[in-house]
Amino acid sequence: MAERAIDTATDVSRTLTEVSEALQAAVGRLSDAITAARQPGMPLSTISAITREAPLASLFVAFLFGVAIGRRR
């Protein structure tokens, strides 16, 4: 019975390690995508620039967007 418990603990440890590695890979890909989107002329760069220039207008647009999505559900 002790051997089964050790085997089970080893399997759980391997599974957690695999999940952790997969999560790290996903975070790395997401970070790369965000970095690429922040390049000049890309969408995230444009949104950042607009938000810096007109923060209140951007907040209003985000609010309207949230209301529109909220009403659909």
Image: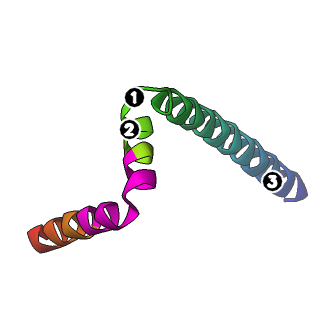
51 part of magenta stretch: yes
Examine the rendered structure and indicate whether residue 39 appears above or below residue 61: above
Find residue 25 and report its horizontal and vertical position in percent: 63, 33
On the image, which quarter does residue 5 sit in?
bottom right
Q: Secondary structure at mark 1?
A: loop
**Disc 2 to disc 1, C-alpha distance:** 6 Å
- The answer to whether the residue labelled 2 contacts the one labelled 1, judged by CB atoms less than 8 Å apart, is yes
Find residue 52 and report its horizontal and vertical position in percent: 46, 53
- The answer to whether the residue labelled 3 contacts the one labelled 2, judged by CB atoms less than 8 Å apart, is no
What amino acid is found at the position of numbered circle 1 in the picture?
Met
Q: Quadrant of the N terminus?
A: bottom right
**Residue marked by disc 1:** 42
Q: Which residues are magenta?
A: 50-62
**Residue marked by disc 3:** 9
**Disc 3 to disc 1, C-alpha distance:** 47 Å
Q: Residue most toward the left? A: 72
The numbered mark, 3 or 1, whose residue comes first in the sequence reads 3
**Residue marked by disc 2:** 46
